[in-house]
Image (tube, rainbow, N blue to C red):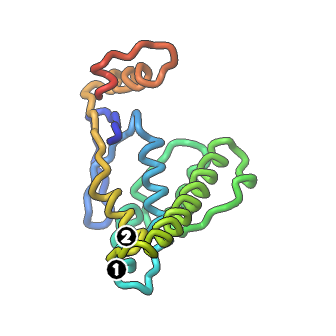
Amino acid sequence: MATVVIPAHRQKKGVGSDEYQTCHIVDGQQRITTLLLLRETIARALDTSKLEEADARAELEKLLVKPGNSELLLETNHQGKEYLHNYFKSGQTENRNKATTLAGREILSAISDCQDFVENWKAFVESLKRTRSRSNTPLIDFLAFLKNRLTFVVHEIQDERTAYTTFEVLNSRGLEVSCVDRFK
Protein backbone atom coordinates (compact mmCIF):
# COMPACT_ATOMS: atom_id res chain seq x y z
CA MET A 1 0.00 0.00 0.00
CA ALA A 2 1.30 3.44 -0.89
CA THR A 3 0.06 6.86 0.16
CA VAL A 4 -0.27 9.85 -2.14
CA VAL A 5 -1.05 13.38 -0.93
CA ILE A 6 -2.84 15.76 -3.30
CA PRO A 7 -4.62 19.09 -2.91
CA ALA A 8 -8.38 18.85 -3.55
CA HIS A 9 -8.36 21.47 -6.33
CA ARG A 10 -8.34 19.78 -9.74
CA GLN A 11 -8.47 21.10 -13.26
CA LYS A 12 -10.12 19.48 -16.27
CA LYS A 13 -8.14 18.77 -19.41
CA GLY A 14 -9.46 17.49 -22.72
CA VAL A 15 -7.51 15.04 -24.86
CA GLY A 16 -9.38 14.19 -28.02
CA SER A 17 -12.89 13.28 -26.95
CA ASP A 18 -11.75 12.24 -23.46
CA GLU A 19 -11.80 14.52 -20.43
CA TYR A 20 -9.40 14.07 -17.54
CA GLN A 21 -9.03 15.67 -14.14
CA THR A 22 -5.51 16.79 -13.40
CA CYS A 23 -4.02 16.98 -9.95
CA HIS A 24 -0.71 17.95 -8.43
CA ILE A 25 0.93 15.21 -6.42
CA VAL A 26 2.36 16.81 -3.30
CA ASP A 27 3.75 13.61 -1.81
CA GLY A 28 4.20 10.33 -3.67
CA GLN A 29 5.87 11.51 -6.88
CA GLN A 30 8.70 8.97 -6.64
CA ARG A 31 6.30 6.09 -5.95
CA ILE A 32 4.12 7.04 -8.92
CA THR A 33 7.10 7.62 -11.24
CA THR A 34 8.71 4.31 -10.30
CA LEU A 35 5.45 2.44 -10.83
CA LEU A 36 4.96 4.08 -14.24
CA LEU A 37 8.53 3.30 -15.28
CA LEU A 38 8.03 -0.30 -14.23
CA ARG A 39 4.75 -0.44 -16.16
CA GLU A 40 6.44 0.92 -19.28
CA THR A 41 9.37 -1.48 -18.97
CA ILE A 42 7.01 -4.44 -18.62
CA ALA A 43 5.01 -3.28 -21.66
CA ARG A 44 8.17 -3.07 -23.76
CA ALA A 45 9.40 -6.48 -22.58
CA LEU A 46 6.19 -8.31 -23.47
CA ASP A 47 6.43 -10.70 -26.41
CA THR A 48 3.82 -9.45 -28.88
CA SER A 49 4.00 -12.70 -30.85
CA LYS A 50 2.07 -14.28 -27.96
CA LEU A 51 -1.60 -13.27 -27.98
CA GLU A 52 -1.94 -12.80 -24.21
CA GLU A 53 1.15 -10.60 -24.05
CA ALA A 54 0.17 -8.63 -27.16
CA ASP A 55 -3.23 -7.88 -25.59
CA ALA A 56 -1.59 -6.80 -22.33
CA ARG A 57 0.83 -4.51 -24.17
CA ALA A 58 -1.98 -2.88 -26.16
CA GLU A 59 -3.85 -2.23 -22.91
CA LEU A 60 -0.78 -0.76 -21.22
CA GLU A 61 0.11 1.45 -24.18
CA LYS A 62 -3.23 3.26 -23.93
CA LEU A 63 -2.72 4.28 -20.30
CA LEU A 64 -0.23 7.13 -20.62
CA VAL A 65 0.17 8.04 -24.26
CA LYS A 66 -3.02 8.70 -26.17
CA PRO A 67 -3.03 7.35 -29.74
CA GLY A 68 -3.29 9.84 -32.57
CA ASN A 69 -1.81 12.85 -30.83
CA SER A 70 0.86 11.10 -28.71
CA GLU A 71 0.07 13.35 -25.77
CA LEU A 72 1.54 12.10 -22.53
CA LEU A 73 -0.90 11.99 -19.62
CA LEU A 74 1.85 12.68 -17.10
CA GLU A 75 3.60 15.95 -16.54
CA THR A 76 6.66 16.34 -14.38
CA ASN A 77 8.16 19.56 -13.11
CA HIS A 78 11.82 18.68 -12.83
CA GLN A 79 14.90 18.72 -14.98
CA GLY A 80 15.37 15.52 -16.91
CA LYS A 81 11.71 15.13 -17.75
CA GLU A 82 12.59 14.84 -21.45
CA TYR A 83 14.26 11.48 -20.71
CA LEU A 84 11.11 10.25 -18.99
CA HIS A 85 8.88 11.48 -21.82
CA ASN A 86 11.10 9.93 -24.51
CA TYR A 87 10.99 6.59 -22.72
CA PHE A 88 7.20 6.64 -22.31
CA LYS A 89 6.53 7.75 -25.87
CA SER A 90 9.07 5.73 -27.84
CA GLY A 91 11.07 3.53 -25.49
CA GLN A 92 14.21 5.55 -26.16
CA THR A 93 16.72 5.94 -23.39
CA GLU A 94 20.28 7.17 -23.16
CA ASN A 95 23.33 6.37 -21.11
CA ARG A 96 23.00 8.10 -17.74
CA ASN A 97 26.41 9.77 -18.20
CA LYS A 98 25.02 11.85 -21.09
CA ALA A 99 22.64 13.69 -18.75
CA THR A 100 23.82 17.15 -17.76
CA THR A 101 21.83 17.36 -14.51
CA LEU A 102 21.53 15.17 -11.43
CA ALA A 103 17.76 14.83 -12.04
CA GLY A 104 18.41 13.60 -15.57
CA ARG A 105 20.96 11.05 -14.36
CA GLU A 106 18.52 9.83 -11.70
CA ILE A 107 15.71 9.37 -14.24
CA LEU A 108 18.01 7.47 -16.60
CA SER A 109 19.25 5.33 -13.69
CA ALA A 110 15.67 4.57 -12.68
CA ILE A 111 14.83 3.49 -16.23
CA SER A 112 17.89 1.23 -16.30
CA ASP A 113 17.05 -0.21 -12.87
CA CYS A 114 13.50 -1.03 -14.00
CA GLN A 115 14.81 -2.69 -17.16
CA ASP A 116 17.24 -4.80 -15.10
CA PHE A 117 14.51 -5.72 -12.63
CA VAL A 118 12.10 -6.88 -15.35
CA GLU A 119 14.79 -8.98 -17.07
CA ASN A 120 15.82 -10.55 -13.74
CA TRP A 121 12.15 -11.20 -12.89
CA LYS A 122 11.59 -12.99 -16.18
CA ALA A 123 14.70 -15.14 -15.67
CA PHE A 124 13.73 -15.96 -12.08
CA VAL A 125 10.18 -17.01 -12.95
CA GLU A 126 11.37 -18.97 -16.00
CA SER A 127 13.68 -20.95 -13.69
CA LEU A 128 10.67 -21.70 -11.44
CA LYS A 129 8.70 -22.94 -14.43
CA ARG A 130 10.99 -25.93 -14.67
CA THR A 131 9.71 -27.14 -11.31
CA ARG A 132 6.14 -25.82 -11.37
CA SER A 133 3.60 -25.51 -14.13
CA ARG A 134 2.20 -22.02 -14.64
CA SER A 135 -0.48 -20.98 -17.05
CA ASN A 136 0.62 -17.36 -17.63
CA THR A 137 3.89 -15.87 -18.71
CA PRO A 138 6.10 -14.33 -16.00
CA LEU A 139 5.37 -10.75 -17.01
CA ILE A 140 1.62 -11.32 -17.20
CA ASP A 141 1.75 -12.79 -13.68
CA PHE A 142 3.72 -9.80 -12.42
CA LEU A 143 1.44 -7.36 -14.22
CA ALA A 144 -1.59 -9.06 -12.65
CA PHE A 145 0.01 -8.66 -9.24
CA LEU A 146 0.62 -4.93 -9.78
CA LYS A 147 -2.82 -4.37 -11.25
CA ASN A 148 -4.82 -6.33 -8.68
CA ARG A 149 -2.82 -6.19 -5.46
CA LEU A 150 -1.18 -2.78 -5.37
CA THR A 151 -3.24 -0.22 -3.48
CA PHE A 152 -2.87 3.54 -3.31
CA VAL A 153 -4.39 5.57 -0.53
CA VAL A 154 -5.07 9.07 -1.84
CA HIS A 155 -5.05 11.62 0.94
CA GLU A 156 -6.90 14.60 -0.56
CA ILE A 157 -6.45 17.81 1.42
CA GLN A 158 -8.90 20.69 0.92
CA ASP A 159 -6.47 23.53 1.58
CA GLU A 160 -3.46 23.54 -0.77
CA ARG A 161 -1.23 25.17 1.85
CA THR A 162 -2.09 22.42 4.31
CA ALA A 163 -1.19 19.80 1.69
CA TYR A 164 2.33 21.23 1.43
CA THR A 165 2.60 21.52 5.21
CA THR A 166 1.64 17.84 5.48
CA PHE A 167 4.37 17.02 2.97
CA GLU A 168 6.93 18.96 5.00
CA VAL A 169 5.93 17.26 8.26
CA LEU A 170 6.00 13.79 6.69
CA ASN A 171 9.35 14.33 4.98
CA SER A 172 11.33 16.60 7.29
CA ARG A 173 14.12 15.04 9.28
CA GLY A 174 14.07 15.36 13.03
CA LEU A 175 10.39 16.17 13.45
CA GLU A 176 8.22 13.78 15.42
CA VAL A 177 5.35 12.49 13.30
CA SER A 178 2.13 11.56 15.06
CA CYS A 179 0.57 8.10 14.77
CA VAL A 180 -2.30 9.59 12.80
CA ASP A 181 0.08 11.16 10.23
CA ARG A 182 2.01 7.87 9.90
CA PHE A 183 -1.21 6.00 9.32
CA LYS A 184 -2.25 8.49 6.60
Question: Whole-Å distance between the Cαs marked 2 and 1?
Answer: 8 Å
Give the residue pinned by disc 2.
140
**Disc 2 or 1, which lies upstream in sequence?**
1
Taking the view exactly as shown, the residue that stands out farthest to the bottom is 49
Residue 98 seen in this snapshot: yes
Residue 34 rendering spot, x and y as whole percentages: 48, 50
What residue appears at the point 62 percent right and 46 percent down from the top-left corner? 106
Residue 162 rendering spot, x and y as whole percentages: 33, 21
Give the residue pinned by disc 1.
52
What residue appears at the point 33 percent right and 35 percent down from the top-left corner? 6
Residue 139 appears in which quarter of the rendering?
bottom left
Tell which of 51 and 33 is nearer to you: 51
Residue 96 appears in which quarter of the rendering?
bottom right
Residue 68 seen in this snapshot: no
Residue 41 rendering spot, x and y as whole percentages: 50, 64
Tell whether label 1 touches label 2 (CB within 8 Å).
yes
Numbered circles on residues, count: 2
Task: Using residue 30 as the reference point, say whether residue 20 is left or right of it.
Answer: left
Indicate the quadrant containing the N terminus: top left, top right, bottom left or bottom right: top left
Is label 2 in a helix, a strand or a loop? helix
The amino acid sitting under disc 1 is Glu
